[in-house]
Image (cartoon, rainbow, N blue to C red):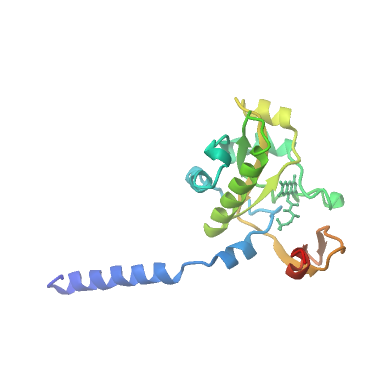
Amino acid sequence: MADNYLGRKMEEYEAQKCASVRTRRVSLASLLAKNRSTRGFDTSFKVRKDQLVSLVEAARLAPSAMNQQVLRYRLVTEEEAHLLLPHIRMGAALPELKLPLEGTEPNAFVVICTDKESRYVDMDMGIATQTMLLRAVEMGLNGICIAAFDHEAVREALHLPLAPQLILAIGRSTERIEVVDIAEGESTTYYRKNGTHFVPKVKVEDLIIK
Ligand SMILES: Cc1cc2nc3c(=O)[nH]c(=O)nc-3n(C[C@H](O)[C@H](O)[C@H](O)COP(=O)(O)O)c2cc1C
């Protein structure tokens, strides 16, 4: 216990800081809700290398079939983004928009790589990817999985020693995105109306097999 005025003030300040960290804890439900695939980013916001490293730290703790941990990650920040951008494709359901719109391109990526072939690779990749996306949302960022890319061109551009399998684009979102409930059999195609991107999701009752 500090016996002087400044010391006591400092202790109070530290206690308040701890309390505010506790109350700012975010729920999984809110992370999941904010974790929408994002195709438009604030280009003035530069994602730092250490932020990408913390995504890999999260993926490292994800489950892995037989704990083989076959995935490796190549981090790409602003300086190298131009090497990837020409080879990725976004928003196949909205070809007329040519996403990402000019001036909203992502400037950071995690390229998930492996040379291993097994039925478990894609399962590991899905779990690792969602783990990284949720971590990104927790940091106030957003992302998107990109499977539509020129694999050979990306491998060459980044001199990758392993085959690139999936790319995560990461950044600060500029998009307004909403989830819409749909029933079994209704269109699952995402769409845009008045500047909002709508993502149809099948209702829980229709997801559960009766
Ligand atoms: C494995 C995988 C690959 C994807 N590849 C692409 C892609 O190449 N380009 C793209 O624009 N979106 C891609 N997406 C994003 C999906 O379109 C998106 O997840 C879907 O529209 C649902 O939106 P939500 O993620 O906001 O729920 C991919 C998603 C997954 C899971």
Q: What's the residue at 69%, 60% (across, down)?
A: 175
Residue extending farthest front: 210
Q: Is residue 128 visible?
A: yes
23 shown above or below 129? below
* Pick the front one: 127 or 167: 127
Quadrant position of the N terminus in the picture: bottom left
Residue name at image x 55 percent, y 39 percent: 66
Instruction: Give residue 44's position: percent from left, percent from top.
Output: 60, 51
Q: Position of residue 26 (x, y in %)?
A: 51, 66
Q: Quadrant of residue 73?
A: top right
**Closer to the camera in the image, 208 or 186:** 208
The quadrant of the image that shows the C terminus is bottom right
Front-most of 158 and 119?
Answer: 119
Q: Quarter of the image holding residue 192?
A: bottom right
Percent coordinates x, y for residue 62 in the rendering: 53, 47
Above/below status of 197 relative to 107: below
Front-most of residues 78 and 35: 35
